[in-house]
Amino acid sequence: MFNIKVLKMEETMKILKMGKVIETVKDVYRAKSLGDTEVFPLVFEEFEHDKAEMDIKSGWMKKDGIFGLKLVSWFAENEKKKIPTVLGTVMVFDAETGAPKGVVDGTYITGVRTGACGAIGAKLLAREDSKNLFVLGAGNQAAHQIAATMILFPNLEKVRVADMLSAANAKNFVKNLPERLKNEFGLDPMKVVFEATNDLADAIPKSDIVITVTPSYEPVIKKEWVKPGTHFSCIGSDMSGKEEIDPEIFRGARVFVDDIPQCLNVGEIEIPVKKGVIKEADIAGEIGDILAGKAEGRQNDDQITIFDATGVALLDLATAMLALEEAEKQNIGQSAEL
């Protein structure tokens, strides 16, 4: 009855370019701020604490005429099995008829659109002269964050990467990173110095932009390490109880989120709000408010800025739709009849 397009991970990797994904994510954030989208309640289940979990995020993009969902799972032991720790599937539907339009492997989409999110937060809130990036976490997502940040900050000079669970993993990640940036993202890694470090007390004060991409339940970055003017893009906290940075960093900071209700429930701001470090009223707005001209971003060079991104299904839907449209143009993917 319905003919749909099915795209595998290898096909989405071939089709999607980070530059286009960045623009797509910005468009979604802006549309959300203008009321042209709707985010539905998050469904989350943890199979084994700090080892295996899944969530379902869904939403509706009114002007684009689509709705849908992404089911994503995180299984820590997958790394030992040589398969991605994060796996996902995106389903896109026609908002007029409810008919399915496509099924897209969500693993690469999750990586590339999340990388775009962290970098966009930095572009809108970090100091314009930022040259030093620190990434907490040395998994697959770290590469996407670094690639997107390099695109939006062409004068970036140094990238430091830490893995607090395995210094060896951080070193191996940094060793292989230049080749990956060149082959997968088409970037020139020669103009940036990459360094593995687990000395956060030394690295954080030297960093203009800090991006966190870990599943930590304990704050790793301390308030006393943070210099004035630092920007944080907090990406790893996506369920209740997770936190990557000292709640005190939020005190007096200018804070933006991707979705206020969701971030209050499962984001980096959850614990600082519960502890009374900040109030919901202290949130300056959603990141799309800056893009829509409804809110001011950074107000001065000494201000600490934070972007809390839990990820909304709208980003996956828009990125999947971009992949489906490009696949149609390039005659890539499989067609299936349901």
Image (tube, helix red, strand yellow):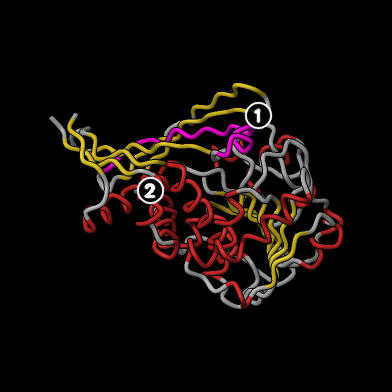
> Residue shown at 80%/62% (left/top)?
203
Looking at the rendered structure, which numbered label has been put on residue 67? none
Whether 80 is among the magenta residues is yes
Residue 66: x and y in percent read: 28, 42
Vertical comparison of 314 with 25: above or below: above
Mark 1 burial class by Cα count in 10 Å: few <14, some 14-19, many 20+: some
x and y percent of residue 265 in the render? Answer: 60, 34
Q: Residue furthest top?
A: 47
The Cα atoms of the two marked residues, 1 and 2, are separated by 36 Å
Q: Which disc is residue 35 wearing?
A: 2
Magenta segment: 66-82
Which residue type carries mark 1? Answer: Lys
Callout 2, which amino acid?
Answer: Gly
Is residue 322 magenta-colored? no
Q: Quadrant of the N terminus?
A: top left
The residue indicated by pointer 1 is 51
Which residue is drawn at the image coordinates 86% and 58% (left, top)? 201
Mark 2 Cα-neighbour bin, 10 Å: few <14, some 14–19, many ≥20 = few
Q: Is residue 110 visible?
A: yes
Residue 296 shows in this picture = no
